[in-house]
Image: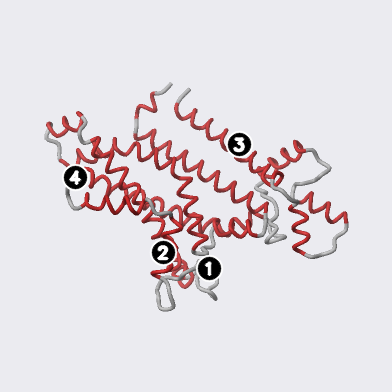
Amino acid sequence: MSYLVKRVVFYLFTAWAAITINFFIPRLIPGDPVQALITRMRGQMTSDAVNALYVLFGLDKNESLISQYFKYWGQLFHGNLGVSFTFFPSEVSEVIGQSLPWTLLLVGITTVIGFLIGTTLGTLAGWRRGSWVDAVIPVTTFLSSIPYFWLGLIAIALLTGPDSFFPASGGFDTGVVPSWTWEFIGSAIQHSILPAITILISSMAGWILSMRNMMVTVASEDYVTVAHAKGLPERRVMVGYAARNALLPNVSGFALSLGFIVGGTLLVEIVFSYPGLGYQLFQAVGTKDYPLMQGIFLIITLSVLLANFVADLAYMLLDPRTRREG
């Protein structure tokens, strides 16, 4: 079986396990989510109305657990993630659809930029040991040990205030209507700068350190020495021989750390009250909105799996040995 087929089977199995666990979340948490909703709404409801709510949220007591499980799969295939308690009667997919673009832009852009900048600086630091670039290693070691949310709290304390350019919270200014206008886009960019810088500093430092160490190891390999002996340009040896092989562990590390990156980003969203999935998840936990928690957990899990699969494809392209596995 080829490397690609093995990875596809692995990710399909992992997705099935994640969806199955997600199904049991509201059924294992102590308490009755429907009764909690009724209590919060402070309304008198007939027994028929209460039973209708159980059916609506996929918790029909007259159905077996297996029947509910297959019905849940049917809902997922139709894109139905249930109804949110907090934003009742809005559907979970609608609530997530409003928050997902904020998280995608923040996580996607900062993760890619952080990886590219960190890998580039790590390559230069490892190739030119003893230069000024190598002097940033102690700083990056310190920064990589700081949690995302703690750096965010420090940034809010030091860089925000009444006269500061950086807003302390939110995704855009109060009174601005979300639309494709320069006023809204400018406000959204202004509010995203500080969270993005927080994530970049924390994530980039780790890539610099790991890539630098790999470059030091690879620089002493025989194929690099042979490339120098052939009289090849130094840039070609650095990029085509040393950096390409040193990059392989970083790509694997990138795939493995995506879950931590996403988790750290969600905490940053909570610290800055940024209107992404992390802040919605924080609100859902506070209001015991089980369907919304389910939906966000599922979206995050599947997104991380998809990103890991893309990283595996990149690894396969960079390392020809994986394509020869049988």
Residue matched to label 2 = 154
Inter-mark Cα distance, 1 to 3: 38 Å
Q: Residues within 10 Å of mark 2 (few under 14, many from 20)?
A: few
| Separation (CA) of disc 2 from disc 4 | 32 Å
Query: Which residue sits at x=47%, y=52%?
Result: 264
Instruction: Write the residue at 70% across / 44% down.
Output: 28
Mark 4 → mark 3, Cα distance in angstroms:
46 Å
Element at label 3: helix
Q: Could you say where residue 307 lies in the image, as x and y percent from the top left?
A: 47, 43
Q: Is residue 137 left or right of residue 181?
A: left
Find numbered disc 2 in the image and state the secondary structure of the residue it sits on. helix
Q: Look at label 3 and name its amino acid.
A: Ala
Along the line of sight, the residue nearer the viewer: 149 or 306: 149
Taking 164 as reference, is 9 above or below it? above
Of tags 2 and 1, the one toward the viewer is 2
Q: What residue is disc 4 on? A: 129
Q: Is residue 125 above or below residue 273?
A: above
Q: What residue would you read off at disc 1?
A: 179
